[in-house]
Image (spheres, rainbow, N blue to C red):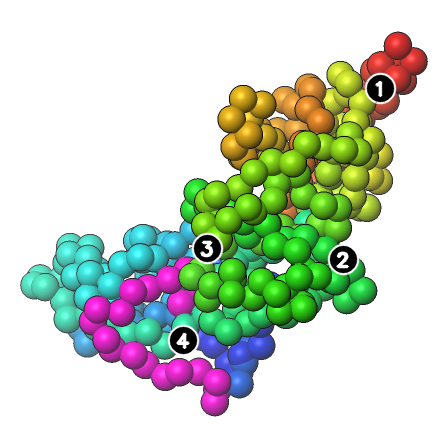
Amino acid sequence: IFSLTLGPYWPRSFAAASEVPKEVQSNTSEDEGDSIESDAIIAPGYLLRLVCREDPRINGEFRVSLNGHVTLPYDVSVPAAGQTVRTIENRLKKTYQRYFRGTPKISVSIKQRRYAVKISGLVKNPGPYLLKENTTLDEALAMANAKTEDLPNGYVRITHGKKSRWISLEDYLKGEKTHDLSAWQGGEQILFQLEKPEIDAKANDASDVDFASPSNRKIQVLGEVRNPGAVSFQRHANGYYYLIQRGGPTRDSDLDKVELLRKDPKTGDPEHISIGSIKDLTELHEADVLLIHPDRPSPFDHTLQNAGIVAAILTSIVLTVFVVKK
């Protein structure tokens, strides 16, 4: 049974593996206080307060994770994002009823409205973060320790559900396209990079995007790598080759959690290809984006993982030399 009780609030990252806030510090005066609106819609990152008269062990404050679920006492996990407070109350009464002789009296209220997002790319501390509704995009990137001098020259991809849009931070900071960025809803994926993206929004509709033809034949390697950035495209080179060119993985990288972003050659629509392990990535295409996700493995698991990585990298170096010479 795990209960998260908050002190004063200051936005900080939380555990990427569980996607639940690990530490959140804040100023109590900034908290909104309990909201018992039964028709209020819950979002990822909201802090919920539960009160049960029959069993005080259910009482507590619980954060809705980035994936929209909330984990509660007695090993109960329910989807909360997109649901109303009343819906969650009714669901919990039915879920916990097996522990009581009758129907328990459980009340749910919203203690704090914060929005959970995940920030990755050219930032020092990638991972999930909690934002206020009015947090600006540059403030969000600063929380993840993006270099201040990089912001005016950067590009950001914001993905929510199946919709994605690219934003030029130069235009954003000038105030030219601030109307394009709506309030945070929770669950957004924010990717920050310096190179011009392979897609550009051509209309106000976030889902209406067009791929630009790649002019520099680059592969973007972002996320948990020692030196994120672009690598010149090499035909028949595998994922390990591009990873090595950017200094290799960081300690927090999980090479079994690799995402490949690519455009469809026929339609030009963006594709999000989750390939699982980098060893399965035997060939990339021009203008692909290779995104290495973070993990927090145990020291023992980390040792085993590093041994496999070293062996794979040594093999990849030999093959890469052969490919380049050919």
Q: Could you classify mark 1 by the number of other residues whose Cα lies within 10 Å: few (under 14), some (14-19), or many (20 or more)?
A: many
Location of the N terminus (image quadrant): bottom left
Q: Could you classify mark 4 by the number of other residues whose Cα lies within 10 Å: few (under 14), some (14-19), or many (20 or more)?
A: many
In this orientation, does residue 252 appear?
A: no
**Furthest residue in direction bottom, as rendered:** 29
Give the magenta part as a residue range: 28-46
First of labels 3, 2 by sequence position: 2
Residue behind mark 1: 320
Callout 2 touching callout 4 (CB < 8 Å): no
Residue behind mark 3: 187
Type of residue at label 1? Thr
Q: Is residue 181 left or right of residue 109?
A: right
Determine whether 48 is above or below 268 in the image. Answer: below
Question: What kind of element bears circle 3?
Answer: loop
Q: Tell me where residue 267 appears, x and y as whole percent.
A: 51, 26
Q: Is residue 234 left or right of residue 283?
A: right
Question: What kind of element bears circle 1?
Answer: helix
Residue at x 56% of width, y 38% of height: 210
Callout 4 touching callout 1 (CB < 8 Å): no
Type of residue at label 4? Gln
What separation in Å lies between label 4 and label 3 (alpha carbons)?
16 Å
Residue behind mark 4: 112
Q: Nearer the viewer, mark 2 or mark 4?
A: 2
In this orientation, does residue 112 appear?
A: yes
